Image: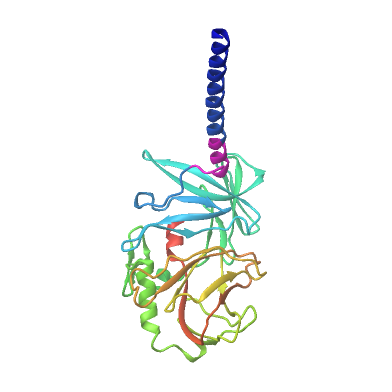
Amino acid sequence: MKSYGLTIFLYIILLVLLSLSACGGDDSAADGDSDEETEGALWDGVCTEERSGWEKCDSNRIQWCHVVEGMEAHFHEGLNCEALSLTCVEHELEEDGAVSYRAFCVDESMTCGDGEFACSDNTAQNCIDGVMALEPCGTKHCHEEADEAVCEYPGDEECGGHGQLVDETCQCDENYETDPEDATNCISTLSFPEMACRIFNEQKDSVAEEHHLDATDSRPGPHAHLYEVMEVHLLAANASNYMHFPVMETGEYVMFLDTAGVVANIYDKDGNEVPFTNPGPNGKCADVLVDHFHISGTYTGDGSSPEPAIVEFQVTEDTEVKLLVLMSEEEHEHE
């Protein structure tokens, strides 16, 4: 009996050990699942004040961390790699001992050597970790600089269109100052949210007649101009109401509205959903611009004309909405 009891005891010990081993195996598998979910990610993707400008890949599109006084740190939309049939990759940068991260849309079939770059078919090509990162320039022109290919506007207006050049130095308009890095250019003294507030407040009480739009129940709807306040009439009788604004180049467009809860979705010219984020009110004039959207616009044309980004509205009663769509200046600064 003692022998039998000892056998049972040893058998129980063996079962316990096997159970512990199995649990250890499950933990390993869980860790593996976690790795698969974040495959290709080089950082945790959390936007904080210390990570201003950091970029990440999210659903095969680029997002970048934006920090501005008066608002919580949040992400903006960058290039949509999926729409360009490219792959989003993250890249670690180190400068003066500080680490940051950038993201690129790459063609994994285009291998390259370190430092290689070129302009081809009005697309900026720059080698990142052995493969080519591609950026279609749209209505901009591709230009080869000393160490990279960039997209830029040819023959920019004098002083950026915000001043006059006097003796090789710009005399800048109100709310602009001379660029400390380029005396022939003027830069805004206002943050992008403040600029949107100023433009909207200047125009909202005297919207031009041609900027009064009747949204339609079919796409693409009437044309909304950039940088102008538009008044859009939405009908509850329509299942959906549509208008569109022009995508001039690949980048982020920001739509500010004086009415919340009316935007249902955003589409490209082919009817595909366009990525966007909706942080809520503009923190610099939250009582006026009560909602806004960061929209990832992808330009796929030949540069001769813009392409529509189509906004879908849904309302339960007839509604007049005033809105303003801007090309994100902060994205240009970020680049």
Residue at (52, 45) in percent of width and height: 90
Residue 304 in sight here: yes
Q: Is residue 165 visible?
A: no
For the image shown, how many numbered marks are present on the structure?
0
- Quadrant in the picture for the N terminus: top right
Residue 182 lies in the magenta stretch:
no
| Horizontal relation, residue 256 to residue 106: left or right | left
Identify which residue, 275 or 163, lies in the foreground: 275
* Side (left or right) of 116 relative to 166: right
Residue 233 position in % (x across, y down): 52, 87
- Which residue is rendered at x = 56% and y = 63% of the image? 275
Q: Which residues are magenta?
A: 30-42
Quarter residue 130 falls in = top right
What residue is rendered at 53% in x and 36% in y?
31
Report which quarter residue 330 is drawn in. bottom left
Q: Residue at x 37, y 69 (%)?
A: 193
Q: Looking at the picture, does residue 18 appear above or below residue 35?
A: above
Query: Is residue 289 positioned above or below 79 on the image?
Result: below
Does 38 lie within the magenta span? yes
Q: Residue furthest front?
A: 1
Q: Position of residue 68 (x, y in %)?
A: 35, 60
